[in-house]
Image (cartoon, rainbow, N blue to C red):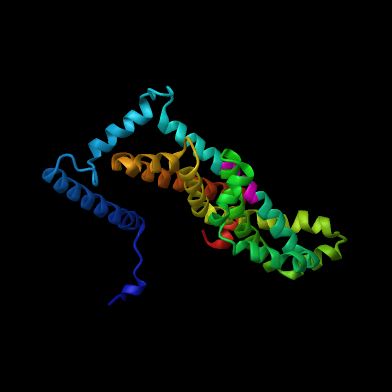
Amino acid sequence: MKRLINQSPNRVWRIGLALLPFALLLMLYISASEARLAENSYDKLLPSFQQMGDAMYRLAFEPSKRTGEYLFWQDTGSSLQRLGIGMLIAASLGMAFGLMTGALPLVGATFSPLLTVISLVPPMALLPILFIVFGLGELSKVALIAIGVTPFIARDIQKRALEIPREQLVKAQTLGANSGQIIVRVLIPQLMPRLIDAVRLSLGTAWLFLIAAEAIASTDGLGYRVFLVRRYLSMDVILPYVAWITLLAFVIDYALVKISRFAFPWHAQQEGK
């Protein structure tokens, strides 16, 4: 008798099993929504898919009477722009700090304790300070993402740099490479795919900081819209927006995976992907 621990589904079964929980949750939601709406047609807690579709159609395809803009696409564009700029800054700073502290022992001994302390500071606690220093504009929101994510990326890159076999550095020095050449030709090529992995792992945190900043002080954005309509109990808007944020996060993560596999195929093979 084949033991359960040794059984592995084939590709078709794997896809089916992966979709099963989503199908069950969907059926559960539809049943609960129909039951609540049958009891009270004005119920807002569990709107039907028709109600959510109508709400999203108004936001996505009908211009706002106040501004004339398509709010759904404006919110999406604003949030993605803030997220993209913040993550780009965080990835650049994290790579620089992580590389220097991991590759150069003198720099690591000097700044590693500071980096550890900074990583322990809750970024959300800094949000009022950022609003005071940078104002309520775009800069404070981007700064929150960058400040919140940079320490994580930096510490991860530092750890990865320290894990690179010492033999590679010795061989490069034997061939006459100086410190700068070792960093550029030995360390950075091996750390770039790790940087993409670190960005992927920190995306969820970045979305959290973005939505929090937009909810507190913004005039557009996905987080702003969700917290704006909550006062009206507009679940027909909140639920699609949450689903859209989740889809965007998935697409960004998937795109980073494809970029990593295309640019660094050796890393995918090394990780067994």
Is residue 125 in sight in this rendering?
A: yes
Residue at horizontal 40 percent and vertical 43 percent from the top? 227
Residue 126 position, x and y percent, is 58, 54
Q: Taken as a whole, is the magenta stretch helix, strand or loop?
A: helix
Image: 128 above or below 224: below
| Quadrant placement of the N terminus | bottom left
Reply yes or no: does residue 151 show up in magenta: no
Image: 204 above or below 6: above
Residue at horizontal 57 percent and vertical 38 percent from the top? 137
Tell which residue pokes out farthest to the front in this image: 132
Question: Is residue 74 left or right of 144 when viewed as pictured?
Answer: left
Residue 102 position, x and y percent, is 72, 64
Residue 77 position, x and y percent, is 49, 34
Residue at horizontal 24 percent and vertical 46 percent from the top? 45
Tell which residue pokes out farthest to the right in this image: 176
Name the quadrant containing residue 140.
top right
Question: Is residue 25 left or right of 158 when viewed as pictured?
Answer: left
Q: In this figure, what is the number of numbered marks?
A: 0
Residue at horizontal 42 percent and vertical 22 percent from the top? 68
Tell which residue pokes out farthest to the left in this image: 39
Is residue 161 in sight in this rendering?
A: no
Which residues are drawn in magenta?
Answer: 84-91
Question: Is residue 221 left or right of 30 when viewed as pictured?
Answer: right
Residue 81 versus residue 184: which sits nearer the camera? 81
Residue 86 position, x and y percent, is 59, 45
Reply yes or no: does residue 85 show up in magenta: yes
